[in-house]
Image (cartoon, rainbow, N blue to C red):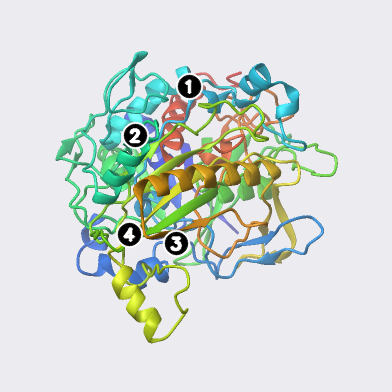
Amino acid sequence: MAKRLKPVDVVLVGVGWTGGILAKELAQAGYRVVGLERGHYRDTIPDFQLPWIHDELRYAVRYELMQDLSRETITFRNNRNQTARPMRVLGSFLPGEGLGGAGVHWNGVTWRFLPYDFEMRTKTLERYGPSAIPEGSTIQDWGITYEELEPYYDKFEYTCGIAGKAGNLKGVIQPGGNPFEGPRNREYPNPPMKTSYAGHLFRQAAQELGYHPFPQPSANVTQPYTNPDGVQLGACVYCGYCERFGCEVNAKASPQTTVLPVAFRTGNFELRTEAYVTRINLSPDKRQAVSVSYVDLKTGEEYEQPAEVICLTSYVLNNVRLLLLSGIGKPYDPVTGQGVVGRNYAYQAFTSVVLFFEDKVFNPFMGAGALGVSIDDFNGDNFDHGGLGFIGGGNIACSTTGARPIQSLRVPPGTPRWGAEWKKAVARYYQRNFSISFQGGVLPYRTNYLDLDPTYKDAFGLPLLRMTFDWGPNEHRASQFAAQVLERIARAIGPKTYVINRLSEHYSIVPYQSTHNTGGAVMGSDPSTSVVNKYLQSWDVPNVFVVGASAFPQNAGYNPTGTVGALAFWAADAVKRYLQRPGPLV
């Protein structure tokens, strides 16, 4: 029998970026907030201290900060004719686990989506007509515009101390920044990161080709910084250990370094770690959420936590699974096209070129997760798609994230795959290569979706989430186009040789690509095609809010975290309005 606890105002399921932001905002407003995190407690001291935080084997290879697949995983297949099998080893993406979630081990690249991204369907129809939308694609507008979200992007950037250079201040294009970005009301809070030698070569080549390079916006803070809540961050030392690691010098913005200290300081926020949520409990008419059930992993005891509002603030896949397990929203059926929960799952599609040199030497071990130079000339609808056979695009970047010794083993084509000659090539070319990548947006298709697996279950006997996903024609055509652009840039730089890596014929869950999963609980203005309204509030159960990249109707050519953070601040304001006057906000 579950032990029923004292009611609170808000329960947060998952305490990463979204949960941390809502915890801060709601606790500061005086509401009693409980955060349920299924992983362990952790903080900069002692968890991210030297020397062990630079243990590549522990963190980058054995995934110390990632989800425990022995307790819960997903099943995967490319299409409905295949039988889904469990993902038993992390590969394509790396969901975080523990306090801070993926906000601890992320690289720190912090974009604002383009205005076009929020109205992709409308803008595409206006410029190119219905035939431009690929057959079977279910793209839709977000129900919110860039202009509405801009103040919340600003709030996230100043909370995190993002380093960058504005390209569009109140409609005026600024030298050195991204001329394609939406207008912003003020400059970044911190100056951009330094430029690596590889980034310098990329910038030169891009400019020669008529493109518009600019420094990548970064949550690796470039100077000592105090955010608006009085939280202090340090300066990045370019150690090269951002991706898959915590930051030992308090320089990479994370929930621990920005929002959670403020939430704890209010006295209104209670964190419970190792709390595995199994379901949201509904009223008899299923129109109201009354509580959350969870298991304390330390003791095995089950608890029921009542609350006025329940916010799903976990990772994309976990948000969708909990909705399905709790019976909130109609599950998506790919055969009929009806239903919404699990619909519009998307990912990102990468194309890259690796350049090898004989006459140039780099220091790849010095870097940072978001250290890079980018161009947006081929992102969104920043270029004419007429006759190209695809819509959307991607960001192109030369990033110097740090070349760790175990996993940084690039060698030129023709090198033996093992033995003495391979070892010589690894040693020679470790400092003589770098890559440029195209991070492509991915459209949703009727055949790509998430649902509950009918066979496999987690450690508690609950169905696993099943992923059905493959690349569509839009992604393949965009990859072929991107490969041509990357080849032009590579030739302008002038390496001895280069290798282009195009999109594989079918998506594989085995090799790492990015932790940029989106969709499944998308936002919109139509309840028949969205799970939540523009305020991230469930259409069916108004006191449930589902916050995070699960709300993206399709994926853009950017890292999602900046938009996830902005939406979390946006949703926090909506939750406050709901608590003051319960009911649908739309």
The nearer-to-camera label among 3 and 1 is: 1
Label 2 close to label 3 by CB (< 8 Å): no
Q: Amino acid at mark 3?
A: Met
Q: Which quarter of the rendered picture does the C terminus lie within? A: top right
Quadrant in which residue 328 is drawn: top right
Q: Position of residue 401 (x, y in %)?
A: 32, 54
Residue bearing the label numbered 1: 146
Q: Is residue 292 above or below residue 298?
A: above
Mark 3 — residue?
66
Q: Nearer the viewer, mark 1 or mark 2?
A: 2
Could you tell me which quadrant the N terminus lies in?
bottom right
Task: Check disc 1 and give the amino acid type.
Answer: Tyr
Q: Which residue is mark 4?
A: 245
Kindly report the distance in space between the C-alpha atoms of the residues bearing marks 4 and 2. 34 Å
Q: Nearer the viewer, mark 2 or mark 3?
A: 2
Q: Quadrant of residue 54?
A: bottom left
Q: Counting other residues with Cα less than 10 Å from the Cα at mark 4, is it few (<14), some (14-19), or many (20 or more)?
A: many
Mark 1 is surrounded, within 10 Å at the Cα level, by few (under 14), some (14 to 19) or many (20 or more) other residues, namely: many
Q: Is 269 left, or right, of 316 in this rendering? A: left
